[in-house]
Image (spheres, rainbow, N blue to C red):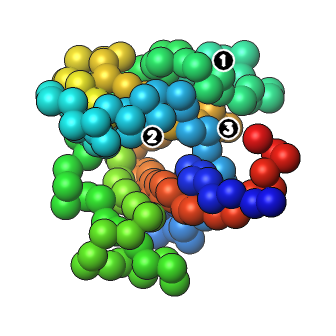
Amino acid sequence: MEKMTITIHGYYHDRFMRTGQTPIDRGWRRNRIMNGCGSLLAALMKGNSGLSGIMYLAMGEGLKAWDGSPPRPDPAAVRLVREIMQRQVTAETIVFLDEAGQPSSVPTARLQIDLSFSRDDFTAEGVQPIREFGLFGGNATDDTDSGLLINHVIHPRIDISAGLTLCRTLRLDFNQGLVPRDSE
């Protein structure tokens, strides 16, 4: 016997642009949906006041030890390892996608967020290494390490330098599907 289940999948796509050069495209990669996402969804469904959905994308330096082989994030983590900046994600930045991956004017079970980052978005001088990012929601504020961690990615090191633009697209997919009952 089969039952309906909702699964949450996250994906991200990085593209690097530098004036006068061919863009570099890393393609689509999966990310880790965190336990905080389930807690946030339950709180939103219950109608808890003072909570919101996706509010910030944070980026972090992570650890130099990850340069050889980035680890998989722990789904129980509640923050990035070394957060260095965050960008507010506004309602205008989030779009619904239809089954064909095209923007939809009506709510669907798929969301997309598109953000771009340049050297000017970071406070450190010189080259800024980036090894991780995550989406935060719930009761997140402008303060680092605040809110519920929705997803977390630890990726190969990216050096953000003058003239480089990182274009990052994230997708969250809340699909329903059939799974065998004995897989419970």
Name the residue located 37 percent from the left edge and 57 percent from the top edge: 113
Secondary structure state at the residue bearing disc 2: loop
Which quarter of the figure is the C terminus placed in?
A: top right
Give the number of the mark in front: 2 or 1: 1
Q: Are marks 2 and 1 in contact (CB under 8 Å)?
A: no
Name the quarter where the N terminus is drawn: bottom right
Q: Earlier in the sequence, mark 3 or mark 2?
A: 3
Residue 70: percent from left, percent from top: 73, 29
- Label number found at residue 161: 2
Q: Residue 22 location, x and y as percent? A: 56, 71
User: Is residue 23 shown above or below 51?
Assistant: below
Observer-nearest residue: 169 or 135?
Answer: 135
Above or below: residue 138 compared with residue 119:
above
Answer left or right for 147 relative to 152.
left
Element class at badge 3? strand
Disc 3 target residue: 156
Residues at marks 3 and 1, CA–CA distance in whole angstroms: 11 Å
Q: Amino acid at mark 3?
A: Pro
For residue 87, what is the image quadrant? top left
Q: Nearer the viewer, mark 3 or mark 2?
A: 3
Callout 1: SS: helix
Give the residue type at disc 2.
Ser
First of labels 3, 1 by sequence position: 1
Residue occupying the far left of the picture:
50
Please tell me which residue lies in front, 42 or 107. 42
| Residue at horizontal 25 percent and vertical 78 percent from the top | 105
Q: Residue at x 72, y 16 (%)?
A: 65
For badge 1, the amino acid type reads Lys
Q: Is residue 11 left or right of residue 120?
A: right
Which residue matches tag 1?
Answer: 64
